[in-house]
Amino acid sequence: MRTPNSKCIICEKPLYRRPGELSRVRHVACMEHRAQAQILSGITDAQRRGLSLGREKGTNHLDGIPKSTESNEKRSASHKIWCAENPDKVAARGEKNRGENHYKWNGGVSRLNTSIRRLTEHRKWMEAVRDRDGKCQKCGRTDCLESHHVVPLSELLRQNGITNREKARECVALWDLSNGIALCIPCHYSLHGRHYAG
């Protein structure tokens, strides 16, 4: 056993800490009194700044940390492989955070149209339409692409008698790629009779 070189600030139990560790810490405490010691010593200005940054809406504590494209692609590829190998776990995770189980659930106040547009299936449909066309079908632009329903989503919901998200997931007509075309944002706005200010 090593010779004690410090004491717990709560119970004064003799403890051994490495010399380098002693120079870095603000207090020494035994495992039993660790939480109390942290409360007594308070938090540093750097910790306070970090906490306030973390509590600000929209801030990302990882901003400024360089992330290479290769590492992002590697992480994405491994995640896709994991999802393909564990479809039951992916489905269970989705069920756990869906509907009433979601932490932002507010009693089902979203309109059905909005709710369906937030589905993973809808996002995949939009991506597939954009990937298939690759350019705006009106002006030929290749950037700022969006997916446009040829037959409006509200009309599809009415035609197929869709009243909830589960029925929407099961409806094949809703996810038919032939009902979508890629348009750039200005063309999409003009098609819906709106003015694009961007």
Image: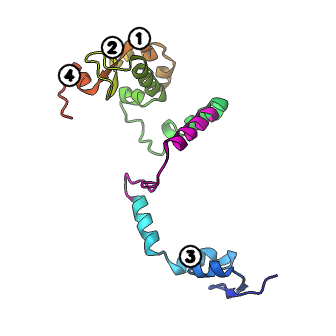
- As rendered, which of 164 and 14 lies closer to the eye? 14
- What separation in Å lies between label 4 and label 1 (alpha carbons)? 21 Å
Q: Which amino acid, mark 1?
A: Ser
Describe the element under mark 4 as helix, strand or loop. Answer: helix
Q: Which residue is mark 4?
A: 190
Residue 125, image x and y in percent?
A: 44, 22
Residue 66 in the magenta stretch? The answer is: yes
Q: Comparing marks 1 and 3, which lies closer to the viewer?
A: 1
Provide the secondary structure element on which disc 1 rests. helix
- Going from N to C along the chain, the mark reached first, 4 or 1, is 1
Compared with 28, 145 (above or below) is above
Label 2 is placed on what type of residue? Val
Query: Within 10 angstroms of label 3, few (less than 14), some, or many (20 or more) residues?
Result: some
Residue picked out by circle 3: 38
Q: Which mark is first along the chain, 3 or 1?
A: 3
First in sequence, mark 4 or 2: give its number: 2
> Are the residues flagged by discs 1 and 2 in contact, CB closer than 8 Å?
yes
Magenta part of the protein: which range?
A: 56-82
Residue occupying image coordinates x 38% and y 20%? 134
Asked which secondary structure carries label 3, the reply is helix
Amino acid found under the numbered disc labelled 3: Gln
Q: Which mark is residue 150?
A: 2
Which residue is the site of mark 1?
178
Assess whether mark 3 and mark 4 are in contact (beta carbons under 8 angstroms). Answer: no
The span from disc 4 to disc 3 (Cα, nearest Å) is 60 Å
In the rendering, at what x and y percent does residue 31 appear? 69, 75
